[in-house]
Image (spheres, helix red, strand yellow):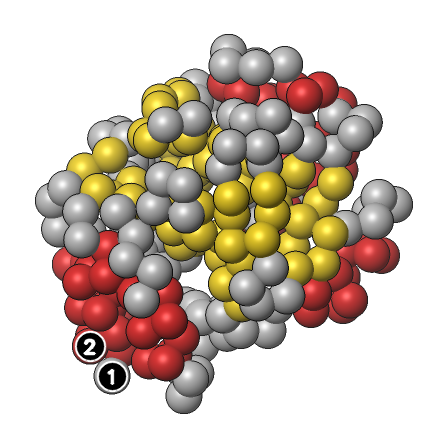
């Protein structure tokens, strides 16, 4: 991926939660695309998704509009992939007190070798206390892909940082929407086929739906506000 010329943006999507987004224009990605990162500003600030290494200048510039980069305490991600943790080393270099946060499987198979800072290895149900926000780790191996996949649920705001589950095409210009996101993401999935076809997907989706999220913080496309449980169950039905 070439470093795009487009500038990033940052918008608050929930109390203390900011969506950083960098658009990829159609000439670089057919139909356009977007990479989102989510910043939780608290006593111990957390970034969920670092973004690809080549987008680090755009992402870091947007974060600096809200808080100094060196205040970052946790650098969390769903699984091992360039858009999830490609800029991890860059952020660690600028935030000397920060630690990676990931699923215990990710820590075991990759992260302890990828960086010199010891990661915080999360088990399913573990809680990360940021000060005001309490984030609960949800282990979801192979949903949608990656043995080491997992998500954070912020039970303070009802936000599920749901990664690639609802990947929407386009440049993601609208920070938050209440319109349908399943239709566009299903069209994209049919073309890209990025789900693992895990036989355990229905049970894991139901586990996430039981959290009753109010906001789905999507990694690609708009964040979504509404009945998150119903939206997740619609996804589960589409995968069945």
User: What is the x, y in percent for residue 73?
Assistant: 68, 32
Query: For the residues marked 2 and 1, what is the alpha-carbon distance in whole angstroms?
Result: 5 Å
Is residue 104 visible to us here?
A: yes
The residue at the far top in this view is 65
In the picture, measured across the screen, residue 77 lies left or right of residue 89, that is: left
Kind of element beneath mark 2: helix
Is residue 18 visible to us here?
A: no
Few, some or many residues within 10 Å of mark 1 (<14, 14–19, 20+): few
The residue at the far bottom in this view is 199
Contact flag, marks 2 and 1 (Cβ < 8 Å): yes
> Which residue bears the numbered disc 2?
237
Residue depicted at x 18% and y 62%: 230
In the picture, measured across the screen, residue 126 lies left or right of residue 180, that is: right
Query: In the rendered image of this protein, does residue 48 appear above or below residue 120?
Result: above
**Residue in front for this viewpoint, 112 or 123:** 123
Query: Which disc, if any, is residue 240?
Result: 1
Quadrant of the snapshot with the C terminus: bottom left
Few, some or many residues within 10 Å of mark 2 (<14, 14–19, 20+): few
User: What is the x, y in percent for residue 132?
Assistant: 51, 32
**Residue in front for this viewpoint, 172 or 232:** 232
Residue depicted at x 26% and y 74%: 236
In the picture, measured across the screen, residue 100 lies left or right of residue 206, that is: right
Quadrant of the snapshot with the N terminus: top right
User: What is the x, y in percent for residue 49?
Assistant: 54, 43
């Amino acid at each position: 991926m070439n470093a795009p010329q487009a500038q990033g943006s940052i918008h608050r999507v929930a109390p203390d939660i900011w969506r950083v987004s960098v658009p990829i224009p159609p000439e670089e990605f057919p139909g356009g695309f977007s990479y989102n990162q989510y910043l939780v500003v608290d006593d111990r600030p957390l970034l969920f998704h670092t973004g690809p290494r080549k987008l680090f200048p755009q992402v870091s510039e947007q974060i600096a509009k809200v808080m100094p980069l060196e205040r970052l305490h946790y650098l969390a991600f769903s699984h091992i992939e360039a858009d999830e943790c490609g800029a991890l080393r860059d952020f660690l270099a600028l935030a000397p007190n920060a630690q990676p946060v990931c699923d215990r499987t990710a820590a075991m198979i990759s992260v302890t070798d990828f960086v010199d800072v010891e990661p915080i290895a999360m088990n399913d149900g573990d809680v990360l206390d940021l000060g005001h926000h309490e984030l609960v780790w949800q282990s979801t191996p192979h949903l949608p892909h990656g043995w080491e996949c997992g998500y954070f649920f912020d039970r303070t705001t009802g936000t599920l940082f749901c990664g690639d589950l609802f990947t929407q095409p386009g440049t993601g210009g609208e920070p938050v929407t209440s319109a349908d996101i399943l239709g566009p993401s299903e069209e994209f999935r049919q073309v890209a086929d990025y789900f693992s076809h895990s036989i355990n997907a229905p049970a894991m989706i139901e586990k996430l739906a039981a959290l009753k999220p109010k906001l789905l913080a999507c990694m690609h496309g708009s964040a979504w506000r509404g009945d998150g449980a119903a939206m997740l169950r619609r996804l589960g039905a589409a995968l069945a």
